[in-house]
Image (tube, rainbow, N blue to C red):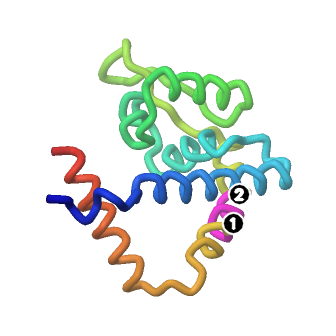
Amino acid sequence: MTHPSDNRAYFFKIDTTIKKIRNALQKQFNDAAFGLTVDQWVVIDHLFRNPGISQNTLSELTTKDAPTVTRIIDLLCQKGLTERRMADTDRRKFLVYLTEAGEAKHGEVLPVVSAMRRKGWGSLSDEDYHHLVRIMDSIYQNVSE
């Protein structure tokens, strides 16, 4: 017996939508000369909301592998936007923070990201949002089992 999802390429639809959003956002970043990639922005945004987290935690939050996060942090450190500090409790562990320049960059970029989110959401309702989150959470859980 065929399952209703067998002929519905919903993964493809999710993937193409994400790519479209990322490409549009990167174009906005380039046009505004922010000097950031979308992946760098994601790291900056997580550090803004979670100052002083480990690179491993940052990897989990961004769903990026550890070497990728290390490269992004290295680049952001070179740009003066982040810094690594040794953890007080474990001298082998580094915690990552935004610098003042990193916090300023977050404030500069956030309005562009917010505008893109609003544009993408268009006239969809709060109820639509709750349905989307419920569906995406269900798919996530189903694939995680």
Looking at this view, is 61 or 127 the one in front? 127
Give the numbered dot on residue 111. 1
Q: Quadrant of residue 100?
A: top right
Looking at this view, is 52 or 57 the one in front? 57
Looking at this view, is 18 or 87 the one in front? 18
Range drawn in magenta: 109-115
Give the numbered dot on residue 47. none
| Amino acid found under the numbered disc labelled 2 | Ala
N-terminal of the pair, mark 1 or mark 2, is 2
Residue at the extreme top of the image, as rendered: 92
Q: Quadrant of the C terminus?
A: top left
Secondary element under disc 1, as helix, strand or loop, is helix
Residue placed at 79% from the left, 41% from the top?
A: 35
Q: Which residue is mark 2?
A: 24
| Amino acid found under the numbered disc labelled 1 | Pro
In the depicted structure, whether residue 23 falls above or below residue 53: below
Horizontal side of residue 18 vs 139, given as left or right: right
Residue placed at 45% from the left, 34% from the top?
A: 64
- Within 10 Å of disc 2 (Cα), the crowding (few <14, some 14-19, many 20+) is few
